[in-house]
Image (tube, coloured by chain):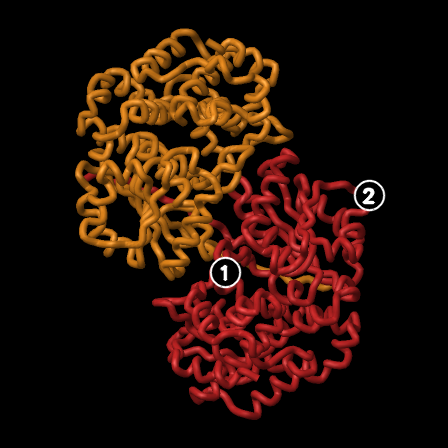
Chain colours: A red, B orange
Amino acid sequence: MPEVEVKIPEVPAGGYRIHIGSGLLDSVWTRLEADCPGRKFVVSDAAVTAAGHLKRLIGAAAPATFVIDPPGEGSKHIGTVIAIVEAMEKAFLGRDTVIVALGGGTVGDIAGFAAAIFKRGVKVVQIPTTTVAQADSSVGGKTGVDSTISKNAYGAFWQPAAVYIDVETLATLDDRQYRAGLVESVKHALIADSGYFEYLEKSMPAILARETAVLEHIAVRNCRIKAAVVEEDPTETNRRRVLNFGHTVGHAVESASGFGLLHGEAVAVGIIAAELIAEKTGLGDAKRLGRIENVLSCLSVPMSIPKDLQKTELFDIIKHDKKAVNQWPRFVLLEAIGRAFCRDGQWAHEVDPQIVDEILDRLYA
Amino acid sequence: MPEVEVKIPEVPAGGYRIHIGSGLLDSVWTRLEADCPGRKFVVSDAAVTAAGHLKRLIGAAAPATFVIDPPGEGSKHIGTVIAIVEAMEKAFLGRDTVIVALGGGTVGDIAGFAAAIFKRGVKVVQIPTTTVAQADSSVGGKTGVDSTISKNAYGAFWQPAAVYIDVETLATLDDRQYRAGLVESVKHALIADSGYFEYLEKSMPAILARETAVLEHIAVRNCRIKAAVVEEDPTETNRRRVLNFGHTVGHAVESASGFGLLHGEAVAVGIIAAELIAEKTGLGDAKRLGRIENVLSCLSVPMSIPKDLQKTELFDIIKHDKKAVNQWPRFVLLEAIGRAFCRDGQWAHEVDPQIVDEILDRLYA
């Protein structure tokens, strides 16, 4: 029987820069002309626009722009992506377009996914303006939007062409969002860097006071940890899973709350769940849990499941987890502060559903 | 100002096999278990199912299946992709899923795109059942669906894990579709292989009689030409553009006809348009055009623009072409039968809109 072999050549190594500073936003537009030539299309949201960040970014320029309204997780669905693609077509944009994503994690996820699929892919530049986006979602190339059934059901790995982090944009961020987003920084410290965790413990007052120097320092440490993990495993075949620490139960709680809980708040609950699982399976201890609870309580984020969420619904969502195999996901666990647990080369672990059931019970306040 | 560099490692060279034969379909399902392990999700359409191909493929197996209905270009929109993703979620499918696309070009494009974006990407196996899909769309990794404004506005480069071509599936294909799909074979011959063009000229009676040996031979030659081009330039930065020969005007005619014309029929018109442009710009000659017209007329495909299509609308669609730069696409032209024209390393060329306007006028029957 005849066969024809199609060879796909290697894709050479690449990369991108994350620029971190305070007050960057005023000069980014000019720098983009040199760093990323091409017609620009800005995606932002109503909250970011109201905070004046869009105006600071574009100055006197008048690029085609799409403002997501209402802002937030509720807009992170395929309908918004369709509206963006149609707006780009009406602006006669082609494959040389550069999408500029200005906003929080939702804006970055939506705009990044639109870039991945518009005419088979165009460049995207991420300019994150929230604690969660600066710590996590703007780096690493995960993009996606939710279906009615699960989070990020639609998505792509699509690395940005560049990332610009201006910590000054955090000054106007709503307090609850500000604190919730810092949970991703706590997560980074827990999985990869005990020294960073100690820094977070002792710097809490300065962090909550939003001191610029501390925020820059945190941004750099977050990006270094995330870059190291992403470099090793860009498409999450194994090691990158450590970044999902706290996210398996976290995603379920977030979805079940109908996004009444912010992403970081739900991840805080998920981190406690992972630590209780660790304790139960001999990997954790009460002292470690105490230190983690202490840091999270400084951030005033929840550490228990709201009573109105049904446990059966949580279970159902967990079964739909992207990483599930035979309808049950694996869990990332710690073996110490600063060190994710790895066994036989695997970074995500099977946990008996019975144990998860028990832990969920304990997590109802 | 601090900077963090994110390095993305090289993606190693890869590839996949195209298996060609007559009567393959009965054994593919068993072979897939070994070739592509993972849970299968079949995407097909109502016409292919009615022709009995789905039953032949799966035998006694009962995989989760999505049947596109109505079949054809009218279903090639994002709504169908959303329905497929939701069906996959309801079947509790995860990242280890293998989508099996059984059908014509539309099925392959839709299913391939769904595979590219479902939970950030799963494998797809292409089993093309039409002349157009076997010659062209099942190989090379182009996937996508149309927006209300242009063709393949949503899409991704997503290479299949394997391709199985069973020429026996062509036996039941509707005559008009059968003939239209062969235009892509003519295109391959014209851009890359004058010997193949001569083979098509002399084999027309056997081709129209659907002789198995001839169909296998054509499949192999098409796949070799396409594989060679795709290998050199998988994401169409330059050389791969030759595969768009006839497609710039072709896509416009296809869209403007509201898909009253089949893809291959519209490409036939586009090939004549490209040849008239070549003649006008000193690259073509009447004798060559005569040979091409002769082959296309054996296939009984149109070579002029239907009178009810507005020229202004055609121009508008051409401006929205994916490959457009400053709202005007470049054109692939021949310098001889079997040889696309290349100048200064470029395979697509600027053509004065005035010339295109004139050629369109000539193409109205």
User: On the rendered structure, is A213 left or right of A154?
Assistant: right
Residue toward you, A70 or B233: A70
* Tag 2 residue: A60
Examine the rendering and report whether any part of residue B228 can be seen: no
Q: Are marks 1 and 2 in contact (CB under 8 Å)?
A: no
Q: Quadrant of the N terminus of chain A?
A: top left
Q: Where is residue A193 in the image (x, y as percent from the top left)?
A: 59, 78
Of pointers 1 and 2, the one earlier in the residue sequence: 2
Which chain is mark 1 on?
Answer: A
Compared to residue A54, the image places residue B145 above or below, namely above
**Mark 1 residue element:** loop
Residue tagged by mark 1?
A234
In this view, the residue in front, B294 or B280, is B294
Compute the Cα span from label 1 to label 2: 37 Å
Residue name at image x 44 percent, y 9 percent: B285
| Other residues around mark 1 within 10 Å, as few (<14) / some (14–19) / many (≥20) | many
Q: Which residue is drawn at 51% across and 15% down?
A: B277
Q: Decide if residue A128 is on the left or right side of residue A11.
A: right
Q: Compared to A73, does A343 lie above or below?
A: below
A241 horizontally vs B288: left or right: right
Q: Dot 2, crowdedness within 10 Å: few (<14), some or many (≥20)?
A: few
Q: Where is residue B95 in the image (x, y as percent from the top left)?
A: 40, 60
Q: Is residue B238 above or below residue A142?
A: above
Residue B97 in which image quadrant: bottom left
Are discs 1 and 2 both within one chain? yes
Dot 2 falls on a residue whose secondary structure is loop
Residue type indicated by callout 1: Pro
Can residue A207 be spotted in the picture?
A: yes
Quarter of the picture containing the C terminus of chain A is bottom right
